Amino acid sequence: MVAPARLSRAFAWPSSAALRTHGVSRSLHMSRVVRAAPAPTSAEQTAQYPSEGFNSSLWKYALLALVGGIVAVRARPATKQEETKPYLTELLESLFVPKEEVQEENRKHLDWSMKKAEAQLLFQDAQKPPAHRFKFPAALDQYPQRSIPVGSQLDASDIQPNKERV
């Protein structure tokens, strides 16, 4: 039978010396920090790259596309020379709202603003009716609700006067 101490040692983690012999570091804080050390140089790091500039084929194709676009715009069939506007002018006019439509919207907004201002003046001068404040509001509960004084509606037809007192 194996003793408990031997059993615990059998399942324990290997020591740091054993790890170092196999080239394994125990943790990151054990590793050595090297500061201001020059980067290692090797043949792989001195690879030659082609120089970058405006001579790549991308710029050639972009220039050809621009020239082709200008030629296509110039070569399109023109309708009537007097009525034709430049292409950029036509493009800008198609993007903007016509002048008459803008003026109509401005007039509608001005009318609406004037109505709102008149309504504001009307409500600004309005006053609440003066409140009638009672000094003792609890006294209202002492009187009947329909302003009929207490005892004013007695039916005295069946009452007989006392003859001894008359």
Image (cartoon, rainbow, N blue to C red):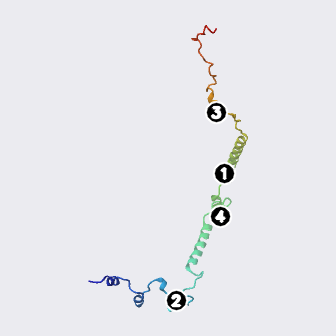
Quadrant, the N terminus: bottom left
Q: Residue under circle 1?
A: 101
- How many neighbours does mark 2 have within 10 angstroms: few (below 14), some (14-19), or many (20 or more)? few
Marks 1,2: beta carbons within 8 A: no
Real-space CA distance between mark 1 and mark 2, rounded to the nearest whole angstrom: 67 Å
Real-space CA distance between mark 3 and mark 1, rounded to the nearest whole angstrom: 66 Å
Give the residue displayed 47% in from the left and 83% down from the top.
28
Q: Residue under circle 2?
A: 45
Q: Nearer the viewer, mark 3 or mark 1?
A: 3
Which of pointers 1 and 2 lies earlier in the amino acid sequence? 2
Marks 4,2: beta carbons within 8 A: no
Residue 123 is situated, as x and y percent measured from the top left of the image, at: 70, 41
Marks 3,4: beta carbons within 8 A: no
Dot 2 falls on a residue whose secondary structure is helix
Real-space CA distance between mark 1 and mark 4, rounded to the nearest whole angstrom: 22 Å
Identity, as a three-letter code, of the amino acid under mark 4: Leu
Real-space CA distance between mark 3 and mark 4, rounded to the nearest whole angstrom: 84 Å
Please state if 87 lies on the left or on the right of 42 as rendered. right
Identity, as a three-letter code, of the amino acid under mark 2: Gln
Which of pointers 4 and 2 lies earlier in the amino acid sequence? 2
Which of pointers 3 and 4 lies earlier in the amino acid sequence? 4
Q: Residue under circle 3?
A: 138
Instruction: Determine whether 25 is above or below 70 in the image.
Output: below
